[in-house]
Image (cartoon, grey):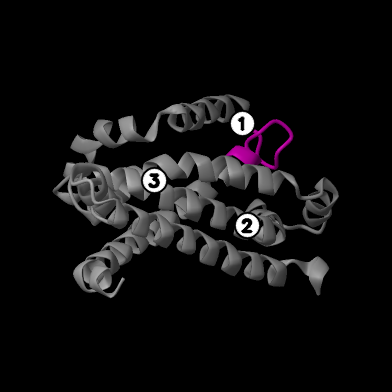
Amino acid sequence: MAEFISQYGALLWEATLQTLYMTFFATLLAYVLGLAFGVLLTVTKPGGIAPAPRFHAVFGWVINMLRSMPFIILVFFLIPFTRAIVGTSIGETAALVPLVVAASPFVARMAEQSLEEIDQGVIEAAACMGATKWQIITRVLITESVPSLVRGFSIVLITILGYTAITGATGAGGLGNIAYRFGYQRYQTGVMYATIVILMLLVCIIQGIFNFISRRADKRNR
């Protein structure tokens, strides 16, 4: 065990940091975009506070199309776009592009579901009190959906953590790259098992943290 750590410890630590970098920054960017998309889907639906049925139908179709594309295909499909933005298609920063593009539609649908859980009576009461559409969005829809959005954040975070393993196999670095190079190409199963254990621990830690935050944010627990 000591020999394994001395030989691969530094490598696994660096790969873990790369995985965390890709996971957290991709999740943050995807959640910003996805939440905005989810708000658009919610407010423009028939019966929303700013109904636009044609826009809602077209935009919803685009979201569904992006969600339906397998991630590994999306990674290769976006290589020219990634190079145009980052300057390269290899590395942790380049991996953020396909990760964000893949996760944003997923976040949009999750956010839409969370926002639609808000009691319509609360929205109507805010409108009757003279609240503007922007105030309804920021102070009613988003504020009341915080516990659900926090739980959704943890789901997206764990999903993107899994996606990083795929980007690692395409040259992005991280634990997926270590598992692919050492575990698959060099048949060093010990390294592969170590990456699996680290990923499992990360998932458990992330889920525990966000469960705690969600409980604290839920008014019903106060």
Ranked by sequence position, the earlier of labels 1 and 3 is 1
Dot 2 falls on a residue whose secondary structure is helix
The answer to whether residue 97 is magenta is no
Residue 56 drawn at (x, y percent): 58, 30
**Counting residues from the N terminus, which is met first, the one under dot 3 or under dot 2?**
2
Q: Amino acid at mark 1?
A: Ala
- Distance (Cα) linking label 1 and label 2: 29 Å
* Disc 2: which residue: 151
Q: Position of residue 40 (x, y in %)?
A: 57, 42
Residue 48 within the segment the image draws in magenta: yes
Residue shown at the point (23%, 46%) measured from the top left? 187
Q: Position of residue 58 (x, y in %)?
A: 52, 25
Q: Which residue is mark 3?
A: 163
The residue segment tinted magenta is: 40-52
| Residue at mark 1 to residue at mark 3: CA–CA distance | 34 Å
Q: Nearer the viewer, mark 1 or mark 2?
A: 2
